[in-house]
Each structure stands twice: as C-alpha cells, then as structure tokens.
C-alpha cells in the first residue's frame, strides 16, 4: 500500500474563520433547557413484593406490582437489590418513576415472543405495531433508570435467530411507509420477525438513563423516539448482537449524551429522524439540539447521522471523544436518494481516532439506493481531529451532481497514515486549513 501525503491550506480563510469556532454558547443554551426528572419520595424494593434475585423465578409480577404501586402514589423509586431478576415479559413504565439497580443487580429478560404484547413502536424509521420493547413507555414524563447494575436482553441465543428471517417484514414495513398505509393497519407480531428494542421511550420528556450496563439487546439498545429533554450518561456497553446500536435518538430534541463507554456491534450513536415518505411528513419534528461529549467509542461506527433522517437532522455538537478500539468509521453522515430531508449545522471538535477504515465519511449515496428524494447536506464543521491510521480513506465526500454537498470545513485535521487521502465528488465550498494526511510536507528541496 502506498502512503499518500497531503498538506493543503485553503485561501478561503475568511470563510473558515466565520464557521470554525465550536459554538459553546449554543451548547450551553441546549444544556440549560434539559430538565432532569423529578421523582416523588416514595420508595419500594421489588424484593418486598416477592421478587427473587435467583435468576430462575419470574420476577415480572413483582416488578409490575411495584410499578402499579408507584403509579398509585403518583410516582416513586423502584429499588432492585443485588441479584439476578428474570422478567418473563416487558417492563412498562408509567410517569414519575425511578428504576434504580443497586450494585450487583441484573435484570434479564425472557425471550418467548408470546410474553411481549403488541405496542405502538417504530422499526427502522417506520411506525408500526410490533412486539413490545423489553423496557417501554409512551407519553410519559420524569423517567429515570440509574445505578451500577445491568440490563440484559438475553438475546444471543433467542431473538437474534430472527435476523436471517426479517427481510420480508423489513421490506413490508418500508412498503407500508411508501404507500401511506394507516399506522393502525401496520400489524406485525406473530408470524413476523422484527426484533424488539431493549429500551424505548416514545413521546416522553425529562428522561435520565445513567450508569447502568447494557448487554445483549435483541435489536437497538436504547431508542429515544419523539422525545425531548433527555440525559444519557455514564453507561457501559457489552452488546454484540446484530444491529445493537448503542443510542438512537429519533425525532428527538434537547439531548445530552456524555461519558459513555461503548462496546457494541453496530453504531455507537445513530441520530435518526424517520424514513422516506413518513419521515418527510414529519418534517416539523427533526432531530435537533443534540450534544455528545466525553465518550469512548468502540464498535462499528462512532457517531452516525442517518440513514433514516427524512425529517431532518440539525444542530449536532460532538466534542472531546475518542476511540478505545477499532471503528469502521469515526464520524459517518449517510443518506440516499430515497430520504429527502437534510443534515446541517454539525460541529465535531477534539476527536481522537486510533485505527479506522475511514476517518470522516459523508455520503448522499448510501447503499446506492433510491431516486427522486436526494438529501441536502451543508455546514458540516470538523476541527482538532487526530487519527492514527485509516486503512481505506482519510476523508470521503460523496454528493450528487444536481445537489452537491456544500460548506464543509476542516480545521487542524491530522491523519498520520491512510491508504487514500481524500476522495471528494460533487461538493462545493470545501475548506481545508491545517490539514495533513501522512507526513507533513517540509520545505521543498533545491534542484541538484
């Protein structure tokens, strides 16, 4: 393999100076709007209601009793002491609930689909009725899941076997989306093979998920759908099944994700906003005002925007993150000509990548799919990024001839080794300042 060397200082420095500074004031404005949940003082231990942390007994009745008792008290804290608690079915939240897993506590879920009733949910950007996520809530406020315990989807020998069977239902859900089939008629469940998420909250606000360890999800790990005022921090991941995205905010706003140690077999963070026709019909609720900071990335991709992003994604701020192992791509913006919508006003600052295939990748042609609904990508800002090795390409930009990716700014980017330096097609106003791929060029040698 050849080492490619690039050192280019763009003369459009005035354009860069206008766009480069990381907008800390805007970040602070978002953080000031985020409200942590307020929980009433009432507290109940699940063991007081019959739960046994013996890993065998079905603890779901006790957890359901605790939830009902807290609801009667207008909210409260459900304490889970040390032990392994098996729930044969989902845990459905009500408002004003704090689920706290004490040190050594684990919640593990059974995998009989008949134990999981159909609920309104979403699957890859399309609303439908499917098996309940393992932890689920809709239309709630003031929700907290905290503690140093573990939430285990127990999916590696069960739900994951549906992965090879899901294609027919995946295509059916997309066809329902494209044909505007009423949501009440999009019934999946028995006879279908769409895996449920581990944790999903819909149309909810004032959410805190803190410190717990996430393991072995059937599908996406944490899906925050049509929700706002969200804090996710201090989590640890050991989630290696297919499609085990770490955190998926979708149609979400005012979100803080910080101090996460990712180790999962798909996107660490994937920001989404609906798919295709349905997503474009919800353009009034883009995913926006999302702050990601002080995270350790390990898995498939670090931060992804898309590919389901048809309602739009804007005002995304990533800062002070690094890898702790292999990533396929560090920052990945992906859409295609089925999506429409836009990705704009994205700021990435102080990112450290070890070995990746592509360090920074922006594409409007994800999977080469679609027609008629190209997406707009603009005002994307990268600053202070160090990458040790890109086994494929340092920087990739792929737009369309009739809808170019534009206003992309790179400042102080150093990729120490790459098979290929930059691959850019159908882009305009790409500004590079203090960018090196390979070894920095020195003073030219004289002719001898």
Image (cartoon, helix red, strand yellow):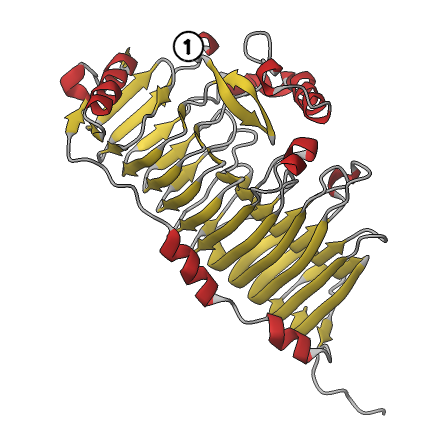
Relative to residue 122, is residue 1 drawn left or right?
right
Q: Secondary structure at mark 1?
A: helix
- The quadrant of the rendering that contains the N terminus is bottom right
For image coordinates 47% across by 11% down, the residue present is: 113
Q: Could one spot residue 82 in this view of the protein?
A: yes
Relative to residue 336, is residue 214 drawn left or right?
left
Q: Position of residue 94 (x, y in %)?
A: 32, 26
For image coordinates 32% across by 32% down, the residue present is: 150
Q: For mark 1, does the 10 Å Cα neighbourhood hold few (<14), some (14 to 19), or many (20 or more) residues? A: some
- Furthest toward the front, the residue is 284
The answer to which quarter of the image holds residue 383 is bottom right
- The quadrant of the rendering that contains the C terminus is bottom right
Count of picture labels: 1
- Please state which of residues 70 and 368 is positioned toward the viewer in this rendering: 70
The answer to which quarter of the image holds residue 340 is top right
Relative to residue 295, is residue 107 drawn left or right?
left
Q: Could one spot residue 439 in this view of the protein?
A: no
Residue under circle 1?
115
Q: Position of residue 71 (x, y in %)?
A: 24, 23
- Please state which of residues 359 and 400 is positioned toward the viewer in this rendering: 400
> On screen, 275 above or below 428?
above
> On screen, 236 above or below 387?
above
- Please state which of residues 231 and 252 is positioned toward the viewer in this rendering: 252
For image coordinates 66% across by 72% down, the residue present is: 435
Q: Position of residue 240 (x, y in %)?
A: 50, 32
């Amino acid at each position: 393999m050849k080492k490619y060397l690039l050192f280019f200082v763009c003369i459009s420095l005035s354009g860069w100076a206008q766009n480069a500074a990381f907008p800390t004031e805007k970040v602070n404005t978002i953080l000031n709007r985020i409200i942590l949940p307020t929980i009433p003082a009432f507290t109940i231990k699940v063991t007081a209601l019959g739960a046994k942390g013996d890993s065998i007994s079905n603890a779901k009745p006790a957890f359901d009793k605790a939830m009902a008792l807290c609801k009667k008290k207008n909210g409260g804290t459900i304490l889970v002491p040390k032990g392994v608690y098996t729930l044969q079915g989902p845990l459905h939240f009500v408002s004003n609930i704090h689920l706290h897993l004490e040190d050594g506590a684990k919640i593990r879920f059974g995998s009989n689909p008949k134990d999981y009733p159909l609920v309104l949910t979403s699957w890859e950007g399309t609303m439908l009725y499917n098996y309940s996520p393992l932890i689920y809530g809709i239309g709630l406020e003031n929700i907290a899941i905290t503690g140093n315990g573990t939430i285990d989807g127990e999916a590696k020998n069960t739900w994951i076997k549906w992965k090879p069977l899901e294609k027919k239902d995946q295509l059916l859900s997309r066809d329902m989306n494209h044909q505007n089939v009423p949501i009440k008629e999009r019934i999946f469940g028995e006879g279908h093979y769409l895996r449920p998420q581990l944790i999903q909250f819909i149309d909810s606000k004032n959410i805190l998920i803190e410190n717990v360890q996430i393991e072995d999800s059937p599908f996406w790990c944490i899906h925050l759908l049509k929700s706002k005022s969200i804090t996710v921090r201090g989590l640890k991941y050991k989630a290696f099944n297919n499609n085990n995205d770490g955190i998926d905010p979708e149609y979400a706003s005012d979100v803080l994700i910080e101090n996460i140690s990712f180790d999962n077999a798909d996107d660490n963070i994937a920001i989404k906003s609906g798919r295709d026709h349905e997503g474009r019909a919800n353009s009034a609720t883009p995913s926006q005002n999302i702050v990601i900071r002080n995270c350790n990335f390990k898995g498939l991709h670090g931060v992804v925007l898309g590919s389901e992003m048809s309602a739009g994604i804007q005002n995304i701020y990533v800062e002070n993150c690094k890898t702790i192992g292999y990533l396929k791509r560090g920052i990945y913006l992906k859409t295609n000509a089925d999506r429409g919508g836009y990705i704009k006003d994205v700021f990435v600052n102080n990112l450290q990548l070890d070995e990746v295939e592509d360090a920074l990748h922006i594409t409007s042609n994800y999977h080469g799919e679609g027609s008629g609904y190209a997406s707009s990508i603009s005002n994307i800002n990268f600053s202070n990024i160090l990458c040790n090795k890109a086994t494929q390409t340092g920087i990739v930009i792929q737009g369309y001839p009739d809808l170019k990716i534009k206003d992309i700014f790179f400042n102080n980017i150093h990729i120490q080794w790459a098979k290929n330096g930059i691959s850019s097609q159908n882009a305009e106003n790409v500004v590079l300042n203090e960018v090196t791929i390979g070894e920095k060029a020195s003073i030219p040698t004289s002719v001898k």
